[in-house]
Each structure stands twice: as structure tokens, then as C-alpha cells.
Image (cartoon, rainbow, N blue to C red):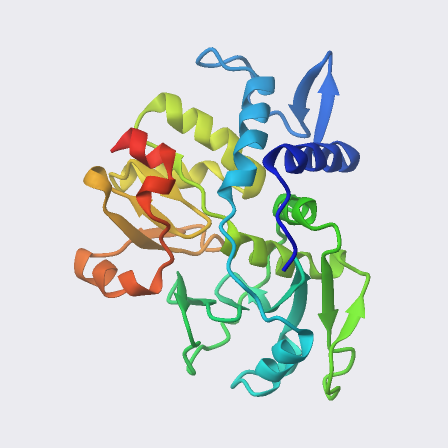
């Protein structure tokens, strides 16, 4: 396993990368995003302040879990699974290997050494072993925003992806075409990413929306849903909401369903899935500690 960069080194690498690809630029000595985060100074904040706070928070928003130690172990899992090997790609990150399926927003898998993520019934769940009855949802795959790919790359510029060149192949082949597999990289990054956005008053909603729009098409909808669900904060990456008094629940999400993209679960149903969500201890989230 490759050692994780220090936060200072990571921030330098990330900012340099984002300036290179144009996600960030410098204007009169200030950081500005490629699409303005705010139209005018609001709540005494500026574009530069929001950009710097966002960059400062990225490093601490990642919560890694182990992948397979070798590509052979990862391939063995794939070829012994109940799902077609051709649906998978293998991503090498920090010298570990993860099996990833990204068909669309409602048929996804990420397989690590002892932890797996999967979508089911519009939920984003975890388990040690995948269910055997996951069904392909016939939906269009929507384009993803590449920001999380650059965040992963900044942790490990040796990021690699392998695929089956032919469906009948018995081993995966390294490819340099990262753009073709961008959704797979982003999905892997989402499983690592664990960040809360407050949504309990107009000031924090405006601030959270600005950052969420960097990651999602219509990112402002997350805070609107959080406020409607009476949550004090929302974690769109792990699909969790935090309610008053610190109770954390999963919620349903389908960003491609424009009529009802989000739904809060009834209490008993949320409790039933509690063991299938990956919740970092609240003491590790200063944002939540300040809100509760």
C-alpha cells in the first residue's frame, strides 16, 4: 500500500492539477473556479474564500478502505462472481486493486478486499459480500463531472485502469484511455469520499450549494432535499442525512429521475438498512459536532 501524502503536499498537487486542467484559474491573485461559484459576494464570502475552503477540505473528506493486494486476486474475484466479467473494470489506486461496475446511476458495484459498495432500490449500500440478485436497470448513463477523478489522481498520479479487451479474455489489459473509463474512477472516488454539507439555514445552504455544484449536475438540489427532510446536514457521496440529535440515516437517490430524485426512508426502513451503510464516527466530523 502506498503511503498517503501529507495534507500540505496533497493540496499543492491538487491545486496544480486543477489549474492545469482549467477547473481553477488565478485572477488578480485570487482563485476562481471554471464556472463561478457565486454571482456576487454573498454573506461576506468571495469566490476566492469558497475555493480555498473547498480545497482545504478535500484531503480530510477521503476515508479509504483496502482493495485487493494483487491484480490476480481481483481478477479471481471477478471471474468467480455471479456477474458477467465484461461488466467490470479494475482500477489500481495506491498499489491496491478494486473491481468496479458502472452501468448507470442505479447499477453500480465497487469491490474491495473486505468491503463492497452496491446500488439497490436507489440506495447506496455496503456489505462484506455482494447480494446475488442485483439487477441491471435499463437507464441511460449520464455524463459525470471529472472533479473526483482529479482528486484521486492527486493522491496517486500512478492511477491505472484495466479492462477486458475482448469479452472472452481471461485476463484484464492495462489501458491508457482514462477518459473512456471516467465514470468508473469517479464512482471509486465516491465510495472513499465522506463529506457533510450543512443545510439548516440560508447562509450554510448557499455556501454548501456552491461547493456541491462542483461535483454534481444540479448540486443545489441536495441541500433543498436536506432542508425538506428536516436534516441538519447531508452527505451526498455516502447518501446519508444527519438529523437533529445526531441520528444518521440513508436516503434514496436517483439523480436521473428528475421528478423524484430524492426520498427519505420511513424510520423502520432506515433502521433496517443501518448495518449496510458506512458511517464514520461522528467525533471524526467536526462539521457535525458543531451542528449537534
Work out which quarter of the rendered image holds the N terminus and state it. Answer: bottom right
* Residue that appears at 70% across and 61% down: 181
| 87 versus 178 height, above or below | below
Considering depth in this image, is 178 or 107 the residue closer to the camera? 178
Residue 249 visible from this viewpoint: yes
Task: Judge from the rendering whether residue 78 lies leftward or rightward of residue 125; answer left or right.
Answer: right
- What is the quadrant of residue 18 in the picture? top right
Q: How many marks?
A: 0
Residue 290 lies, in percent from the top left, at 31, 29
- What is the quadrant of residue 163 in the picture? bottom right
* Residue that appears at 37% across and 41% down: 284
Residue 81 lies, in percent from the top left, at 54, 84
Residue 260 visible from this viewpoint: no
Task: Judge from the rendering whether residue 33 lies leftward or rightward of residue 202; answer left or right.
Answer: right
| 243 versus 264 height, above or below | above
* Residue found at the far right of this picture: 176
Considering depth in this image, is 24 or 126 the residue closer to the camera? 126
| 64 versus 217 height, above or below | below
* Residue that appears at 65% across and 56% down: 2
Residue 247 lies, in percent from the top left, at 23, 46
Task: Judge from the rendering whether residue 162 lies leftward or rightward of residue 40; answer left or right.
Answer: right
Residue 251 lies, in percent from the top left, at 33, 54
- What is the quadrant of residue 122 in the picture? bottom left
Considering depth in this image, is 79 or 74 the residue closer to the camera? 74
Work out which quarter of the rendered image holds the C terminus and state it. Answer: top left
* Residue that appears at 63% across and 53% down: 143
| 282 versus 44 height, above or below | below
Amino acid at each position: 500500500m502506498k503511503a498517503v501524502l501529507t495534507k500540505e503536499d496533497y493540496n499543492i498537487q491538487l491545486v496544480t492539477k486543477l489549474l492545469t486542467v482549467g477547473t481553477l484559474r488565478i485572477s488578480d491573485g485570487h482563485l476562481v473556479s471554471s464556472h463561478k461559484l457565486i454571482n456576487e459576494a454573498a454573506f461576506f464570502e468571495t469566490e476566492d474564500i469558497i475555493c480555498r475552503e473547498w480545497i482545504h477540505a478535500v484531503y480530510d473528506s477521503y476515508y479509504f478502505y483496502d482493495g485487493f493486494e494483487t491484480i490476480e486476486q481481483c481478477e479471481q474475484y471477478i471471474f468467480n462472481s455471479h456477474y458477467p466479467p465484461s461488466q467490470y473494470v479494475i482500477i489500481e489506486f495506491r498499489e491496491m486493486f478494486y473491481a468496479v461496475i458502472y452501468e448507470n446511476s442505479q447499477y453500480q458495484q465497487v469491490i474491495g478486499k473486505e468491503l463492497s459498495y452496491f446500488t439497490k432500490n436507489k440506495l447506496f449500500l455496503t456489505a462484506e459480500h455482494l447480494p446475488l440478485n442485483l439487477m441491471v436497470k435499463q437507464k441511460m448513463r449520464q455524463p459525470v463531472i471529472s472533479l473526483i477523478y482529479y482528486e484521486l489522481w492527486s493522491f496517486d498520479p500512478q492511477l491505472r485502469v484495466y479492462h477486458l479487451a475482448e469479452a472472452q479474455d481471461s485476463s484484464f489489459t492495462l489501458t491508457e484511455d482514462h477518459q473512456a473509463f471516467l465514470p468508473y474512477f469517479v464512482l471509486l472516488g465516491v465510495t472513499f469520499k465522506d463529506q457533510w454539507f450543512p443545510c439548516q439555514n440560508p447562509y450554510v445552504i448557499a455556501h454548501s450549494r456552491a461547493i456541491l455544484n462542483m461535483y454534481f449536475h444540479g448540486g443545489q438540489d441536495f441541500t433543498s432535499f436536506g432542508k425538506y427532510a428536516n436534516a441538519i446536514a447531508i452527505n451526498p457521496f455516502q447518501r446519508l442525512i444527519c438529523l437533529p440529535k445526531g441520528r444518521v440515516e440513508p436516503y434514496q437517490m436517483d439523480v436521473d429521475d428528475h421528478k423524484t430524485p430524492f426520498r427519505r426512508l420511513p424510520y423502520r426502513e432506515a433502521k433496517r438498512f443501518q448495518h449496510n451503510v458506512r458511517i464514520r464516527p461522528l467525533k471524526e466530523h467536526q462539521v457535525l459536532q458543531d451542528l449537534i
